[in-house]
Image (cartoon, rainbow, N blue to C red):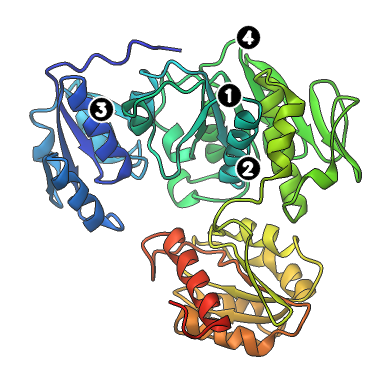
Amino acid sequence: MATDGFDVKDMNVVLVGLGRSTVAASKLLRMKGAHPFITDSGQSAGLEIWMEQAQASQIPFVIEEDQASSFSRADLVIISPGVPWAADFLTHVRAAGITVMGELEFASTFCTAPILAVTGTNGKTTVTTLVQEMIQSAGHSAVLAGNNDTALSQVVLDKGDPEYIVLEVSSYQLESIDLFHPRVAALLNITEDHLERHGTMEHYAQTKARIFSNQTRRDVAIFNADDPWTAQLSTSVRAYPFYFSLTNRGDSTLYADDSFFYYEDKKIAPISANLLPGRHNLENVLAALAIVQAADLPMQDAVEGLRTFRGVEHRMEHVRNIGGVDYYNDSKSTNEQSLCVALKSFNNPIVLIAGGRGKGGDYSAVIPLIKGHVKSLILMGEDAVKMERAFQGLAPIHNAESMMDALRIAQKQAQPGDTVLLSPGCASFDKYRNFEERGREFKTCVYRLSDPSAS
């Protein structure tokens, strides 16, 4: 892994897409002697926040629909994850002989700590957060970065030298890598998502597999042996392969049965050490254990981190019990597959709040689960009409104009022993800046249900 960093002294660097990653990268560039400048088309969600942050840090930027003029003086172009690698304007930039790279790629060249990187359609944030907890329980320091609240450039900027960097990596970030080299890389699963950008499942899967492209035989590549896409990709990597599975034991495999987690045939921890609901979270725990094992960290110390881990905000997050009804916030459910996973996690009747900005799916995979698990369905957002057509006749359907309206309906529908679940199965951008804002509003409204004076 490179440690000297990309030499940018005295360069004019144009960053495309005003947001968390480009603001952090601009600060890093300036620290390294470059002259950063951010350009944005004005279509980014939550742009006002990042405009304020750029202004506060005295980072020059411009909002313009036609960005071509911004590149005329560029020595280097760095793109945010939201900018497609294949965008037409970047083709012209490369044709002019200007280097283009992603923020993750740029920042990674300055990292001295081993990178433990995780990608996949679902579960990335839960796995990376659990891995950090486990590493800290084993007596080592670790920071989280990447496709979450902290850009990798910010980690490089911050004082301190962690022993490990635990990195959540999206397919958007992987489009633009060339040198990025994690010591351990894990591919959790591949299900239909982001096809509006990647086109086909084959291209999406190959983009995900780029996380392994610079690994060597001294590195470790971790795969979900139960996922047909990831299992197929495991045959074409140079790194040493590790696996996790809920169905089969094997060499270099983390496995679980009804009673224990195992590494090969060795018991690692009882299943009771895991506090998270759902079969999908057993896979997440196995993936985290595999990463800890692959990094050669003390497993028994790391397991103590599992015993106290209660999950991540907005991912199957238990909010409150009101009158015998449990309320769960799964706002991170932004696609059809995430909704399926959430519905499979409960055995009791579910009052489901769903909807938002759809990603083009037809919701056919959700139909059997609505029929088998959902006693009442509350829909909101842009895709509410499409969802209503897909789920008509499977459960009583109600429409809500706001989150508070949805929860008032849910409270009337739910009985003691039921679960009220926010699992939208859609993106949040029709009503909210991001899924976090949606989840926070859900929690605020739940508190108001139990205490009308709560804010």
Q: Is residue 138 left or right of residue 2?
A: right
Horizontal side of residue 62 vs 219, given as left or right = left
Q: Which mark is residue 28?
A: 3
**Marks 1/2: CA–CA distance:** 31 Å
> In the picture, residue 104 is in which quadrant?
top left
Q: Which mark is residue 217?
A: 4
> Looking at the picture, how far across and down is residue 96, in whole percent?
17, 24
Q: Tell me which amino acid carries mark 2.
A: Ile
Q: CA distance from mark 4 to mark 2?
A: 24 Å
On the picture, is 380 further left or further right than 330?
A: left
What residue is rendered at 28% in x and 36% in y? Answer: 24
Disc 2 target residue:
190
Q: Nearer the viewer, residue 318 or 196?
A: 318
User: Can the viewer see residue 5 in this picture?
Assistant: yes
- Image coordinates of residue 156 in percent, x first then y, are 35, 26
Q: Secondary structure at mark 2?
A: loop
Q: Is residue 400 visible?
A: no
Query: How many other residues sit within 10 Å of disc 2, few (<14), some (14-19) or many (≥20)?
Result: many
Classify mark 1: helix, strand or loop.
loop
Tell me whether circle 1 and circle 4 mark residues in contact (CB < 8 Å).
no
Q: Inspect the image, locate mark 4, and give the three-letter code of the amino acid beneath it.
A: Arg
Q: Which of the two labelled residues, at mark 3 and mark 1, occupies the earlier sequence position?
A: 3
Residue 278 location, x and y as percent? 75, 55
Identified at 41% across, 12% down, the residue is: 2
Tell me the tag on residue 140.
1
Contact, mark 3 vs mark 2 (Cβ under 8 Å):
no
Residue drawn at point x = 52 percent, y = 28 percent: 142
